Image (tube, grey):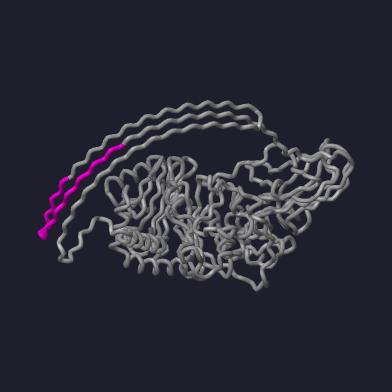
Amino acid sequence: MMYGKETKSFEKSYVTSNLGKIYTASLAFAALLISNSQLYATVPDTNAALPLDKTASFIQDLVSQYTRNGDFVAVSSTSGADIQVLIHVYDYEDGYLSMGGSVRGVPHTAFMLKGDVQKVYGWVYFADTNLVYKYATDANKVVSVKQVLVSEIYSIDDIPQPDTGPRPFMPEYAREEYPDLPHLGPLPDDADLNDLQSKPESTKVLWMDIRDMMNGADPITLTREDMWVTWQVVASGLSMFDLNVTTNKALYDASSAYNRGYAYFDNSEGRSYCCVDCFGSSKGCHVYRHADGYGTGRTALHEYGHLLGVYDYGTTAGETYFTGIPEFQWVPIMGNYWYGNNWDEALFQWSKGEYAGANVTTDFYAVASSVVDLASDDIIDAQPLVIVNDTLEWAENFGQINVFDTGYDEDDFSFEIASSGELDITVERIEHIGGAMLDVHAAILDSSGNVVVEHNPKAARYANLQTPLESGEYTLRVAGGEEGTPADGFSRYSSVGYFGISGTVTGAVDTDTDTDTDTDTDTDTDTDTDTDTDTDTDTDTDTDTDGDSDSDSDSDTDTDSDSDSDSDSDSDSDSDSDSDSDSDSDSDSDSDSDSDSDSDSDGDALQGSDDGCGCALVGKQMTADTTTRLTQILMLLLS
């Protein structure tokens, strides 16, 4: 990975020498960007996009320019004139290029570009005039430049918050019941808020930069529980992706440019904003704190939606943020999620604009999955329900409804009734309400595939199945639910996420969970070790007051070692174990050491390169970290 002219020295020297200028420019730039009067003031000219080059050639030309020039590249405007861009951040790995910077010699400007031989996306922004040149690949793999609105590259959110009363009761599920799903349940006592990870095995990383909201291990303003919920909501709302939502900066730093995205969390209140379609680039989101984790988490999830490539979902009637459908307690997370504050069964979902009057019909999953892979199906074939003494427990019976390119996911669980019995089970979403997108539909099928009973109650996210059952084989089928119509309600499109199953099934055949293992092991080990060591050391050291030092040292070492080891091991399938071990060890060691040291007494200290506690190194590291953190904040728009 290359970062800042293939080393970090360029970025460090640039930042150190220009920190004051960057800070002043960033404040002015942010003020211009957030100003409503200027945000939509400039209407792009009607000239068609100017074709520049084939995508592969365009990428290679930028890499060559950077290699040749050292800190800048030239890109074209719609008139064909060159724009010289000073590069602050540079990554080029495995054919993927990510660059960030500003226009050379022009204040209040920003530049971003990412891509490979298949696709390029980027822009140059002049804040003082609201002039934006966007670079993108067309269907013929040709990169073109076009003038666009600022709102096409940045989303600055100003979402009205209605007075909706207290937040709803949020059921919690014990985290220890799901050790492989760390984002579930209440805050663990030993949780490290600076090292939360939703899917540690994932290559793709989404970093929540909460460092300025923390004072070491503890939050500055919010509670530990609210910080946990903030992360939990984001992790739940993105659990359908193969993506590790983390607060650990080291994981972000270790990831390749195309495998990562981030948001900076500000410990103050304000209007959150994000660079649109900037996952895999040097740009990210800026998320402001709200009163609790429920609000901060949903705000962060909304901004991450922009980062993954979609805009705000409103209405053709002029509503910037759709306020949802109260009858079904449903609202798109890219709409006005505040309207779901006091809904006990609130459902905040990703959308493709199926509701009546939608002004955006972009398929979120189609866009987002172009940069982050969808999670693989966890239950492909029917698996047995774990039933012990007629009881089902959450810990053994759970799954995930996934997103499919075509069709919808359904998870099947098989069980058998030995004699007639009664079934009373509940299937419920188990992720945090702020990010849990699953509306549950569940059904019991007989051995012929006929529906015995099914349930998907209105404005509720669970299914409760109650019915008598005759002897035979049955299947519990869990799927994403839908309510009303897509135009006035919601479809199965985003009814995805984790669920748990609990309840009782009388007369059921217990699931066989017993495992018998017998092991018989005989081991004989004989070890003989003889070691003789003689060491003689003489050292004479004289130091006079002029700083000269004379030293004589003689050292003789003789070592003899004999070692014999015999080991026999037999293993059979009985749980008996015998072990014999004999060990003889003889060791002789003689050591003589003479040391004479003379030092002057004028008070001069003789020191090595280490100060004894590492304090000098820690001080340097603190300075570097402080500069890096401040730089990341200030360079969010200018990098």
Q: Nearer the viewer, residue 412 or 107?
A: 412
- Where residue 499 appears, as percent x and y from the top left, is 69, 50
Q: Is residue 453 left or right of residue 324?
A: right
Can you say whether 267 is above or below 385 in the image?
Answer: below
Which residue is located at x 71 percent, y 49 percent? 480
Q: Nearer the viewer, residue 508 or 623?
A: 508
Query: Which image quadrant: the N terminus?
Result: top left
Magenta segment: 533-552
Dominant secondary structure (helix, strand or loop) of the stretch shown in magenta: strand
Q: Quadrant of residue 460?
A: bottom right
Q: Is residue 303 left or right of residue 441?
A: left
Q: Nearer the viewer, residue 40 or 440?
A: 440
- Where residue 524 appears, as percent x and y from the top left, is 53, 28
Is residue 627 shown in magenta? no
Q: Is residue 292 left or right of residue 527?
A: right
Give the residue at the far left of this rendering: 546
Q: Quadrant of residue 21?
A: bottom left
Query: Which image quadrant: the C terminus?
Result: bottom left
